[in-house]
Image: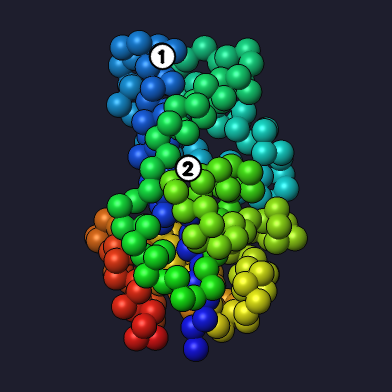
């Protein structure tokens, strides 16, 4: 019986991609007005995000260093002069990014409709920033604890111990929890390795779910799905 619901944050509750795309476009535009490849900046930045975040999660570099590497790589790709202070450069991007933090329109209603369950957020970002995002989109105190690797013994999705630890943080077993998120590896097939059920949130509605896993295209579909489960 499902007693708890875990939500992914970026791409599920918060429109991370829109905020990041607008943020890096604004940063490049300010640094190089009229850059001929400005329209490519968002895609390049998105492609750099995963590998460098995974290097940090694997302990290969610090949080700050992965940000420097991303910024350096983007500048090299766009033939921009690499800033002397990469931390300050990233901070300038981050200011634009924070300005774009917005909840998806379906997030608040879905959370409210599932208020009878034990709720939580399971995300791979850093604790302080992810908590700030939840506050910024108006869900603090409504969606339960924000759980990252920093509070789960260094375990990040899709490591099985991440899911068992998150369930324990809700006072439940993995089999009593369902995770809803947009990343197939981290939010759909990953939980299954720990005996946790999951739902794939495919907001673009263009792909088929992995066999055996339910797929929704909006969080509005989640409460009735959980009710049937």
Q: Does dot 1 land on a helix, a strand or a loop? A: helix
Residue 201 found in image quarter: bottom left
- Structural crowding at the residue carrying mark 1, measured as other residues with C-alpha within 10 Å and reported as few (<14), some (14–19) or many (≥20): few
In the depicted view, which residue is nearer to us: 58 or 6?
6
Residue 30 place in picture, x, y as percent:
41, 14
At 34% from the left edge and 78% from the top edge, which residue is drawn?
Answer: 225
Q: Is 34 above or below relative to 168?
A: above
Residue 37 place in picture, x, y as percent:
33, 21
At 52% from the left edge and 21% from the top edge, which residue is drawn?
Answer: 92
Looking at the image, tell me whether mark 1 or mark 2 is earlier in sequence order: 1
Q: Is 226 above or below relative to 91?
A: below
Do tag 1 and tag 2 residues touch (Cβ < 8 Å)? no
Q: Is residue 69 visible?
A: yes
At 64% from the left edge and 16% from the top edge, which residue is drawn?
Answer: 85
Image quadrant holding the C terminus, namely bottom left
Residue 70 found in image quarter: top right
Please indicate whether residue 23 sits to the left or right of residue 192 in the image.
Answer: left
Give me the disc on residue 136. Answer: 2
Task: Return the residue at label 1.
Answer: 30
In the depicted view, which residue is nearer to us: 214 or 176?
176
Q: Is residue 184 visible?
A: no
At 63% from the left edge and 44% from the top edge, which residue is drawn?
Answer: 128
């Amino acid at each position: 019986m499902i007693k708890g619901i875990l939500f992914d944050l970026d791409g599920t509750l918060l429109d991370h991609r829109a905020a990041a795309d607008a943020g890096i476009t604004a940063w490049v535009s300010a640094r190089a007005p009229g850059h001929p490849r400005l329209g490519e900046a968002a895609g390049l930045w998105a492609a750099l995000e995963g590998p460098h975040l995974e290097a940090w999660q694997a302990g290969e570099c610090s949080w700050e260093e992965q940000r420097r590497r991303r910024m350096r790589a983007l500048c090299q790709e766009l033939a921009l002069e690499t800033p002397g202070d990469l931390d300050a450069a990233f901070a300038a991007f981050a200011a634009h990014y924070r300005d774009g933090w917005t909840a998806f329109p379906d997030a608040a209603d879905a959370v409210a409709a599932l208020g009878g369950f034990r709720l939580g957020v399971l995300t791979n970002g850093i604790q302080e920033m992810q908590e700030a995002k939840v506050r910024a989109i108006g869900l603090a105190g409504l969606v339960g604890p924000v759980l990252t690797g920093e509070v789960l013994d260094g375990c990040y999705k899709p490591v099985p111990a991440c899911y068992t630890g998150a369930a324990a943080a809700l006072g439940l077993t993995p089999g009593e929890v369902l995770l809803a998120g947009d990343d197939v590896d981290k939010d759909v097939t990953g939980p299954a390795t720990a005996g946790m059920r999951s739902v794939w949130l495919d907001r673009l509605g263009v792909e088929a779910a992995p066999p055996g896993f339910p797929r929704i295209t909006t969080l509005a579909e989640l409460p009735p799905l959980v009710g049937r489960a």
